[in-house]
Image (tube, rainbow, N blue to C red):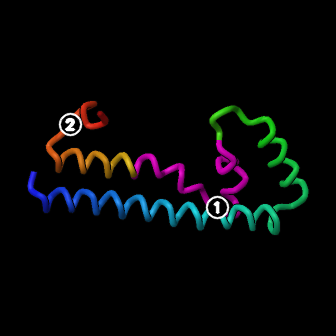
Amino acid sequence: MPKQKMLTARTILMRERRAYQDAFIDWFERMVICHDQMLTEGERRAFQEWDHNRADGVRTDEWPGWEKYIGVSPLNGAARSMTAASKLVSIIQGKTGPSFHK
């Protein structure tokens, strides 16, 4: 593979990763502020109950109550975005299928 194509693929992945990281850090800061300053006492109790009883593998940022104030967590779209970027790199590198992840 030509070096230029490899650098382009790496650049695309780096941009995607950085954009995701920046978006999540910003959203996480808003989540903390929202919890401390915007939620009503009843909403805080509902969140604490939900957080205490949530299933394994469910993240705190997935609480449905956040959407009203700060929107949906960027993590919910991150997997799709990173998968798309990975597929693009796979195509550029001429790799397909499961062997890409080995």
Which residue is identified by label 1? 28
**Which residue range is magenta in the image?**
59-81
Determine the CA span between mark 1 and mark 2. Answer: 35 Å
In this picture, is 84 found above or below 19? above
Q: Nearer the viewer, residue 65 or 58?
A: 58
- Which residue is at 54% across, 51% downward? 75
Number of residues whose C-alpha sits closer than 10 Å to that of mark 2, classed few (under 14), some (14–19) or many (20 or more): few
* Disc on the earlier residue, 1 or 2: 1
Which quadrant would residue 74 be assigned to in this image?
bottom right
At label 2, the amino acid type is Thr
The image shows residue 7 at horizontal and vertical percentages of 21, 61
Number of residues whose C-alpha sits closer than 10 Å to that of mark 1, classed few (under 14), some (14–19) or many (20 or more): some
Q: Residue 96 carries which label?
A: 2
Q: Is residue 7 left or right of residue 80?
A: left
Report helix, strand or loop for mark 1: helix
The image shows residue 77 at horizontal and vertical percentages of 48, 51
Q: Main secondary structure of the magenta part?
A: helix
At label 1, the amino acid type is Phe
In this picture, is 13 found above or below 99? below
Callout 1–callout 2 Cβ contact below 8 Å: no
Q: Is residue 88 left or right of residue 56?
A: left
Tell me the quarter of the image containing the C terminus: top left
In this picture, is 100 found above or below 78? above
Q: Which of 2 and 33 is in front in this view?
A: 2
- Which residue is at 84% across, 42% downward? 49
Magenta span has 29?
Answer: no
- Which residue is at 73% across, 53% downward? 65
- Which residue is at 67% across, 66% downward? 29
The image shows residue 34 at horizontal and vertical percentages of 75, 65
Q: Residue 55 carries which label?
A: none
